[in-house]
Image (tube, rainbow, N blue to C red):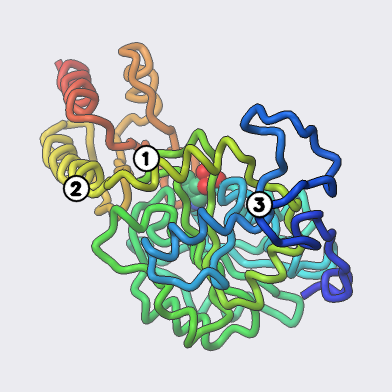
Amino acid sequence: MRQCIKSLTPYSTARDEYKGEVGVFLDANESPFDNGYNRYPDPHQHCLKQMLVLKKGIPEENIFIGNGSDEAIDLIFRVFCEPRIDNVISIAPSYGMYRVAAAINDVEMREVQLGENFTLPVDMMLECADDATKVMFICSPNNPTGNAFPHREILRLADRFNGIVVVDEAYIDFSDMPSLTNEISQHPNIVVLQTLSKAWGMAGLRLGIALADAQIIDIMSKVKYPYNINVATTRIAGQLLLNDVTDHVEEIKAQRAEVARKLSAVKTVRHIYPSDANFLLVRFDNPDEVYDYLISKGIIVRNRSRVRGCDGCLRITIGTIEENMKLIEALKEYER
Ligand SMILES: *Cc1c(COP(=O)(O)O)cnc(C)c1O
């Protein structure tokens, strides 16, 4: 942890100093006129966290809620990395936000390319580390490659590395592999990131989750803005978390197999990578042309063809059955 964080006196909110729920509240300089939003939100998000406790079977003291995973990623830099002195390691190709957050925090980012067929380069990551390496980022299932890494490999890295191992599980709901959260008690340097933006369908609300040892959660909670999750978001997320998204997740997984099957019959498709996520990474003979063609048909995919390790690839999110059919129809028409 950075020295300035170790010695931090966190902001103490009015709600921290008086915890009762009924009374005449004249302590926070709020407006007394009730319009549904005149009071500050709970800085600890107790209600939302209790819903996550029930869903994930993880104690509240191990849960951090942020304004998207982006907030958790940024906080990890601010808590653990001394700007211009410390460094972090990430696999590559992977999610672009790690590199952006590193740059904003003026922290060196070292990237280690994935192995053949996108395997986790555990030994190379360990070799790449020095005394100033504080954090390693592993995205599993990985964006944009789509594959999840075996737990045994991630745990081998966590056990050998004297620092924080962030495992970004944004896509875990679409994987047949379980979450690594059950390993946190045995491997207290692992921080698991999850999000309500993907399987839960709440990308617009901005809610990210970090699951980790209580000491790590405690310090992240002290460094975050006191009221990082607003009242409106809290209420809507509380309602949406009552929904069961299993059917949607199952439909996406079935459609992922179906789209892969149909893509394999398209001539310009050279390779379809196996996916544990809600997208497919697909290599094309002429990716730029296919990308532009799809746009002309009103279908927008992500062009990853110039990303090292993803040469020639487009990343295609699995949509509704109708949307996926449009994609396949368009590609068949392209062939003619
Ligand atoms: C989409 C995604 C997230 C989610 O980010 P939010 O800020 O929670 O919306 C996190 N990590 C990865 C790798 C992603 O692809």
Tell which of 246 and 329 is nearer to you: 246
| Residue 125 appearing in the image | no
The residue lying at 23 percent from left, 30 percent from top is: 320
- Pointers 1 and 2 in contact (C-beta within 8 Å): no
Quadrant (top left/top right/bottom left/bottom right) for the C terminus = top left
Residue 199's tag is: none
Question: What is the crowding at mark 2: few (fewer than 14 residues within 10 Å), some, or many (at least 20)?
Answer: few
Does residue 85 sit above or below 252 in this rendering? Answer: below
Residue 42's tag is: 3
Element type at mark 2: helix
- The kind of residue tagged 3 is Asp
Q: Picture coordinates of residue 104 (x, y %)?
A: 76, 49
- The kind of residue tagged 1 is Cys
The residue lying at 32 percent from left, 55 percent from top is: 173
Is residue 186 rendered to the left or right of residue 130?
A: left
The residue lying at 84 percent from left, 45 percent from top is: 26
Q: Is mark 3 within 8 Å of ligand 1?
A: no
Question: What is the crowding at mark 3: few (fewer than 14 residues within 10 Å), some, or many (at least 20)?
Answer: some
Is residue 187 rendered to the left or right of residue 3?
A: left
Residue at the spot of label 1: 313
Residue 250's tag is: 2
Picture quadrant of residue 304: top left
Does residue 302 sit above or below 55 in this rendering? Answer: above
Q: How far is mark 1 from mark 3, CA to CA?
A: 44 Å
N-term-proximal mark, 1 vs 3: 3
Element type at mark 1: strand
N-term-proximal mark, 2 vs 3: 3
Q: Picture coordinates of residue 311 (x, y %)?
A: 41, 44
Of the two numbered discs 1 and 2 in the rendering, the one whose residue sits closer to the viewer: 2
The residue lying at 76 percent from left, 47 percent from top is: 24
